[in-house]
Image (cartoon, rainbow, N blue to C red):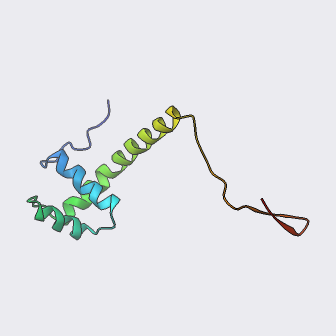
Amino acid sequence: MAKNPFRYFKTSPEFIQLAVMMYVRFPLSLRNVEDLLHERGIDICQESVRLWVDRSGPVFAGKIRTKRASYMRQHTQWQWHLDEVFVKINGVQHYL
């Protein structure tokens, strides 16, 4: 049974997820996240955001990695593109 990362927090898990995703996804400081949430009517301090990021961040990252890996396994029709390759053979540069 997996541990609940939101256990012992009195704040709603939705608010915690929002704060962590804002901090991790966008180049925001803890104070900026605090201000943005305050504008939305969520009154928290920056230390709460830091604690949530430290505690819940790895859990969210693990979920994202798992989803990404399962998606890649389902779609075996990978496509990749090769663009402007130069190869040096015996000191002579060739364009492929």
Q: Residue at x 27, y 59 (%)?
A: 22
* Residue situated in front as seen by the camera: 21 or 91: 91
The quadrant the C terminus occupies is bottom right
Return the x and y of residue 11 as percentages of the image width and height. 13, 49
Residue lying at 29% horizontally and 51% vertically, measured from the top left: 55
The residue positioned 46% from the left and 37% from the top of the image is 71
Residue 45 left/right relative to 65: left
Q: For this view, does 50 lie left or right of residue 44?
A: right
Residue 63: % across, % down: 37, 42
User: Is 70 in front, or is 76?
Assistant: 76
19 relative to 10 in the view: left or right: right
Vertical placement of 23 versus 64: above or below?
Answer: below
- What is the quadrant of the N terminus in the image? top left
Residue 95 quadrant: bottom right
x then y, percent, for residue 80: 61, 48
Residue drawn at x 22%, y 60% as measured from the top left? 49
Residue 72 versus residue 27 in the image, above or below:
above
Q: Observer-nearest residue: 2 or 86?
A: 86
Q: How many marks?
A: 0
Q: Quadrant of residue 67?
A: top left
Q: Residue furthest top?
A: 1
Specify the quadrant of the image occupied by residue 34: bottom left
Depth check, front residue: 13 or 37: 37
